[in-house]
Each structure stands twice: as structure tokens, then as C-alpha cells.
Amino acid sequence: MVTPHTKLVNLEMINTLTDGCPGCGRPFNLGDSVVMACGAWEGGPKYIHENEAVFDPRTSTYVERKCFEAGREPGL
């Protein structure tokens, strides 16, 4: 489902997101739903697959699912 926080991967994004999804390790495909999320990785928020993220109403941001479920604070 596309929300105001969600983007669909387009050709330009495919060319810049060459490392794949930091949340699950899978590559991005055209039309994938992605959100900008915080997680346990270095470097601040990154695009990850929407299904790998949880919206945290406390902070009004998306957090990587594994990080959110572990109750850890997202990495910077």
C-alpha cells in the first residue's frame, strides 16, 4: 500500500540503491514499496522494503522490523 511515507522503486532509485535492502539483504526491484527507516546499521536512515519496517507512532518514523522487535534504539 502506498502511503505518503512510501515510495515505489523507479529506475533512478535502482541505479542508486545498488547495495540492496539493509533490512533483509535482498535487491530492490522496480515497483517495490520502500520507506526511509532507521535501523541497526551505520549511517542513519536508509531505504528498506516496506514489509521490513514498522511505523513507530512514538517517534513518527519507520524502524527496521528486527530492531523494533528487539526493543533497541535505532542506530545513527
Image: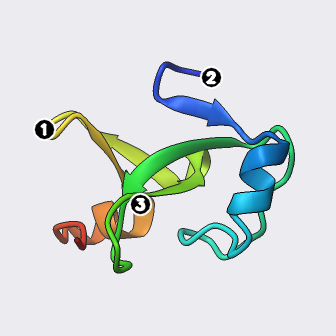
Determine the CA span between mark 1 and mark 2: 21 Å
**Residue 7 picture location, percent across and down:** 62, 33
Q: Secondary structure at mark 2?
A: loop
Secondary element at image label 1: loop
Task: Give the alpha-carbon distance from disc 3 to disc 1, as whole Å.
Answer: 15 Å
Residue at 37% x, 58% y: name it. Answer: 45
Q: Which residue is mark 2?
A: 2
Left or right of residue 63, residue 51 in this image? right
| Residue designated by label 1 | 58
Which residue type does callout 1 highlight? Answer: Arg
Question: How many residues crowd mark 2 within 10 Å: few (<14), some (14–19), many (20+)?
Answer: few
- Mark 2 is on which residue type? Val
Residue 11: x and y in percent read 85, 45
Q: Nearer the viewer, residue 65 or 18?
A: 18
Check disc 3: other Cα within 10 Å, few if <14, some if 14-19, many if 20+.
many
Mark on residue 64?
3
Residue count near mark 1 (Cα–Cα under 10 Å), binned few <14, some 14–19, many ≥20: few
Considering only order in the chain, which callout, 2 or 3, is on the residue closer to the N terminus?
2
Whether pointer 3 and pointer 1 mark residues with C-beta atoms closer than 8 Å, the reply is no
Residue 27 lies left or right of residue 42; in this view the side is right
Q: Position of residue 28 (x, y in %)?
A: 77, 58
